[in-house]
Structures are given as structure tokens and as C-alpha cells.
Image (cartoon, helix red, strand yellow):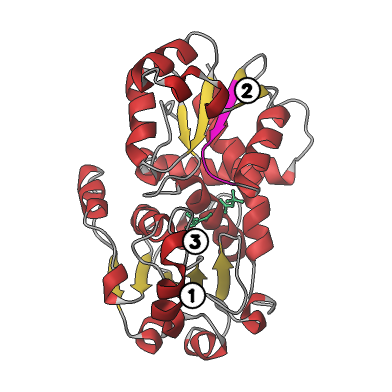
Amino acid sequence: MTQLSSFLKTTDLSQAQLGEVLELAARFKANRGDPSTKPLDGQTWALLFHKSSTRTRISFEVGIHELGGHTMILDQNSMQTGRGETVEDTAKVLSRYIHGIIIRTFEHQFIEDIAHFGSIPVVNALTDALHPCQIVSDLLTLAERWGEPGSLLDSLKGRKLVFFGDCASNMAHSWILGGALAGMEIVLCGPEKFAPKPFVNDLLKEAGLEQTYTFTSDVLAAAKAADAVYTDVWVSMGDEDEREQRLQEMAPYQVNASVMGAAKPDAFFLHCLPAHEGEEVSSEVYKSAQSIVFDEAENRLHAQKAILSFLGAR
Ligand code: CP
Ligand code: NVA
């Protein structure tokens, strides 16, 4: 596999690279604790988080340690960026010390700028626009149910995944990109006001990928014969001021027994977590046998170790 320079969006991977990442992630999962794989040996990776995180931050820290690297938590408030040092200079200076950086922030442009001005790999750990590491983990979670090692990517092709709720969110946009890359049919279903933003179509074009998604507000038509049903919080980090209005507008798009009843009988339910039971998903569905949300959470670790291996091995 050719080296990746950074991982800012799912389409930074080619289809072939996505296949390789899924296979490597599955090998990491099957052989957890194998001390022979240390592609980050002697490296130091920094984590800069401007938003809360449980899964992403912890799985990256654990993953980097398991790959032989060291981690360093950066605190925006105690760095000179808090006093006005430019992003350009910060990126250039960090590149002289560390081997890579994992960033969760608001504006997507911030991580693009760090990658542009710096010379080390940058990993998008979620921005307002995209959450690519989550999608790779989700694809792994579905592929390990539908396929087997050696054919993980192939097992995703032609499958229908329906995303309910805020279709203008980082998760919805990431499914549009990840679904196109994996050859899946993606249906996004939510209020018209929360339709996907046009920038994702530009990213598809830039990557030479066909649009494999549609958007609708018709819940049961969307869910019909779905292989997988996905949702995310209705109030993303940064949207808290709109909470009451969002809850009201998204209420018809809750994933509940009636939605799952329209999907295939063996459809899986997925959620990136954290979840708000009773809002975007009913407790019944969340706790059902079809729900594989904790496999998704676990797979963050294995998928990110695979991504890091392609970024960090020199
Ligand atoms: N799914 C996810 O990114 O979780 P955290 O916000 O806890 O990192
Ligand atoms: N859309 C959510 C995802 C959390 C993992 C948010 O941005 O808060």
C-alpha cells in the first residue's frame, strides 16, 4: 500500500486502500497483544481535542501505545495558539518535534491548514464537517458480519444503509463519502431543512466517485429492505443552542420498532455513540439483538491502528 500523507476525509483512501485498511484492522483485532507489530516504535504522536470525546481519544491513545508509539495530550489553552500564535507557525513547529497529530475540532479548515503548513500526518478525529475514522470502524463492523477476512470490502458492495436524523451532520456527510467508496447504497432520511450540504458532492467529484446516496423525508420508504440502519445524536457538539427546536423537528425520524420492521429482518442497527435513548433511537431498538453499537465502539481501536500503520510506518 502506498503511504498516506494524512487522513482528513474518508476519500483520502482509495477503494483499494480502504480494502487493505479493513483487512489489516481485522488482523489487529484477531491478534491483539501480538508484540511483533510496532510500526510506530520510537514515535511520538500528539492529540489535540477542542471538543469532548470518550471513544476517539481513548482508542487513539491505546492504539498508539499498542503500535509502539508515545502519546502527548496537547492543551490549546496552555499553548501559544491561545495567545494568538498562527496556525501556520504552530504546524511548522510541531512538525519539528512530533511524528503525527490527531485533531478533533470545530472548523474543518483548521485541520486542512495544519496538514498544509505542517509536514507530519494529520488525522481527523472529528470536525463539524466530517468524522472519517468512525466510518472506517463502522465499515469494519458491518464487513465482519457480512464477509470474512480476504473479502471484507467486497461484502459491503451493493448493501443498503439508511441514515436517519441530522443529514447535514458530520456523520451523515461521512456516510456519503464512505458509502460511495465502499460501493454501498446510502439513503439519508431527515427533515428537508437538514439535507446534506453540497460540499460533499464536490469531495465525491474530486475523488472520482459516483454519487451513491439519495435524500428523502419519507421514513418508511427509506427504511424499506435496508441491510443496516444508522443514526446519530440530533444535537451535535456545537449545536446545543438549537436543542429544543432540533428535538422537535427530528422527532418523526426516531429509529424505533416500526423503522426496523420496514428494514430487512436481519438488518443491523448502528450508532456512533454517545446515544440518547428515547430521542434518536428507542430503547427497544438500542438494546435489541440487532444492535451492534458496542462492536462499533470496539472497532474504533482496531480500525485506527490500521490507519495509523499506513500513516506512521516510515
Ligand atoms: N463516536 C465518537 O466519536 O465518540 P466520542 O465522541 O466519545 O469520541
Ligand atoms: N454528530 C456528533 C458525533 C459525535 C461522535 C457530534 O458531532 O457531536
Q: Earlier in the sequence, mark 2 or mark 3?
A: 2
Q: Assign the magenta stretch its main secondary structure.
A: strand
Q: Earlier in the sequence, mark 2 or mark 1?
A: 2
Q: How dense is the environment of label 3, judged by Cα within 10 Å: few (below 14), some, or many (20 and up)?
A: many
Q: In which quadrant of the rendered view does residue 309 lie? A: top right
**Secondary structure found at label 3:** helix
* Start-end of magenta stretch: 45-52
| Residue 7 visible (yes or no) | yes
Give the amino acid at mark 2: Pro
Q: Which residue is mark 1?
A: 227
Q: Which residue is mark 3?
A: 155
Tell me: is circle 2 under 8 Å from ligand 1. Answer: no
C-alpha distance separating marks 3 and 1: 12 Å
Percent across and percent down for residue 113 are 33, 27
Towards the viewer: 62 or 90: 90
In this rendering, would 51 be left or right of 118? right
Towards the viewer: 254 or 14: 254
Determine the residue positioned at 38% across, 14% down. 89
Disc on res. 39:
2
Q: How dense is the environment of label 2, judged by Cα within 10 Å: few (below 14), some, or many (20 and up)?
A: many
Residue 48 included in the magenta stretch of the image: yes
